[in-house]
Amino acid sequence: MKRNLLAGLVATLFASGAVAMEPFTVQDVRVEGIQRVEAGTVFSYLPIKVGDTMNDEKAAQVIKTLFATGFFKDVRIEVAGSVLIVVVEERPAIAQIDFVGLKEFDKDQLLKGLKEVGIAVSRTFDRATLEKAEQELKRQYLSRGRYAVTITTTITPLDRNRVAINFNVDEGETAKIKQINIVGVHALKEKDLLAALELRTPNWISWYTKSDQYSKQKLSADLETLRSYYLDRGFLEFNVESTQVSISPDKKDIYITISIVEGERYLVSSVKLAGDLTLPEEEFRKAVKVKPGDVFSREKLNESTKAIADKLGAQGYAFANVNAAPEIDKEKRQVAFTIFVDPGKRAYVRRINITGNTKTRDEVIRQEMRQMEAGWYDAERVVASRARIDKTDYFSEVNVETPPVPGTIDQVDVNVNVVEKSTGNISIGAGYSSAEKVILSGSISQSNIFGSGKFLSLQLNTGKLNRTVGINYTNPYFTVDGISQGFDVYYRTLNPTSLGYAFQSTSYGGGIRFGYPIGEKQTLNFGLAVDQTTIDITPITLATPIQYIQFQAQHGDSNVTVPATVSWTRDSRDSAILPTSGGTQKAGLEVAIPGADLTFYRATYQIQQYFRLSKDLILMLGGDLGYANGLQGQTLPFYKNFYAGGVGSVRGYDTASLGPVDPLYPDTRLGGTRKAVFNSEILMPFPGLDKAFRFGPFFDAGNVFTDNYTYADQGLRMSVGLTATWLSPLGPLKFSVGQPINEQSNDKLQKFQFQFGTTF
């Protein structure tokens, strides 16, 4: 049988007539040479079938099409009579991929990246793709400052037309930024500019931050930082002329030179408002932070336009445009601004769409919405709605979008998308505190029962001082108006003898409580409970204070109280976990109602306020005040006294150690009927660590007082030191190193204090 052989390499010559093919009608098509590729796959790509006429043009098309699949490294066409024979030689398959010398990257990450460019086990091997992968690997190393990296690739043929790829990597040393120069600095200080950049020369934390490793992306961000730095200080014509990055011959040191033109500093001559203001001009003037005579600041100008847009958004103008147009007077070095206001058409909300809530009921989310359907759009209410949904702590993500309704100019939808997270918890854990030593704790809780938004928990806590078993239930929407209802049942023992208190107590009881919202951030709480407390006073030989003995003689070992509580709380924090602004306040009054065994009252007030001093510095100021006394001629039960000292109070002093002591037994702290504690901290993130770790200096002052232990005589105990908080994966860790600065001879000191884990 005679065959005409046409090589694939000369397929392009068919059309020119260098190799002629007599046209014929194809009676059959055969494929030869395939090993791994299915014959059906080849036939599906062939642009010719039985019955078609074969000619030079069709032959070229067949070869080109099969080459384009990437499965074959050679394709030939043979003709035997009226039979078309396609002979192929498959590319080998990749059987394995190995790395040698890999330290900087994780192997699995690299394999994933190689797969994206076409190199993976079981895929067809292509040398062009491999070269592309080598360049991508090298680029990844260059982005990490490994400029001396060399990558050698070895291809090893295996049986069954397979290959093994081995990447031999010599990573070399990481190049460090040796020097950064900013040329053209006159009006400002170069050291201040360098401090604002992300790229830096090596320092003590560079091993973690990698700030001494050059990358093009970081440099671009730093150039924009420089631009913002100058524009916020009046240099309206600032410009970066050029940047030059060079590397030493040994590829270990990098030198960066940034050439800038500062220009002149401009003052603001005037700020005008124009356009359709819709509101009184004075309302907008209050939002303008740029004033005539001020040094120009782009940041303040942007804040002004945003504040005006927010005011319009709060009035329903969802599509408002606010832009500032400058008029520059170069001779006087002044700039005037006209802020053009275009409110657009007032919009209302067509529909609120909630998605992603696979477990939580729709109404649980809708009851937190402050923006209503069919109501005028209010940007502030939309933001408040998102914050309230987020604070439920039922979701890991909450995203809110307000797209315009297609085909309208005055309607928007509010799309709320949430990502559910686990709200149930069954745990057995352990903690440790410098006061209570080892604490074993466990809990079974569900803060979103069956997606209803209700909270139920069974808590167990065992520690050296406190042991508690309790059941808590809360329905945050007992009524549609947002009134909450809850109840608590508990059994608690207190054993503070290790701290010098010569008594033990056992309490059990329960109560009901209601919360009435009086604003977005304020709540009134009311509660009524019944409590029975049994006192066990140690023998007199163990240093029992006379006050304890007198109380037991007057009231007995066991007493019933009916405490009624009322409190006001306000929470304006921007975050319940790591706040940076806002604060919390709580004022409470507890009255043991007359008619039971004991009657007394306790008034308390706590406040914590956060202030952002800079991007990374947060100031916290706090206070804790208390006043208590007996009613109807009774004295305050000694176990209801206030105590101070330790973590959460005055650090540097032992837990609950401040205040009056028994004159006969100086190690026994009696507590007081009045308390005053003040705290201040400056918190900042630790360089190179995530925001979950914050530290800073603190100053504490506080004490407890009685009629015989007064503020005038004793004053406040004070301390200074360093504190740190870390929200670790195993639980919150708090520790402090405090130095008392006016301690007395009988004060108990504890300079290092910490608490690890959460207690119930």
Image: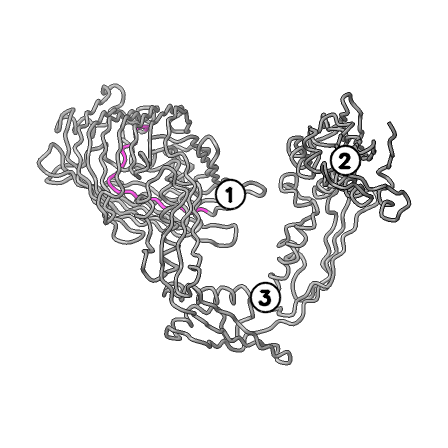
The quadrant in which residue 169 appears is top right
Q: Is residue 377 above or below residue 212?
A: below
Real-space Cα separation, disc 3 to disc 2, in angstroms: 56 Å
Question: Is 92 on the left or on the right of 264, as rendered?
Answer: right
Instruction: Check the picture and name the quadrant holding the C terminus.
Output: top left
Q: Residue furthest left?
A: 595
Residue 295: image x %, image y %?
56, 70
Question: Is 136 on the left or on the right of 430, as rendered?
Answer: right
Any magenta on residue 706?
A: no
Whichever of labels 3 and 2 marks the residue nearer the N terminus, that label is 2
Q: Secondary structure at mark 1?
A: loop
Residue identified by numbered label 1: 691
What amino acid type should be assigned to the residue bearing mark 1? Lys
Q: Is residue 645 above or below residue 371?
A: above
Residue identified by numbered label 2: 126
What amino acid type should be assigned to the residue bearing mark 2? Asp
Question: Is 667 on the left or on the right of 177, as rendered?
Answer: left
Real-space Cα separation, disc 1 to disc 3, in angstroms: 29 Å
Q: Residue furthest bottom?
A: 331
**Residue drawn 81% across the image and 43% down it:** 55
What amino acid type should be assigned to the residue bearing mark 3? Arg
Residue identified by numbered label 3: 233
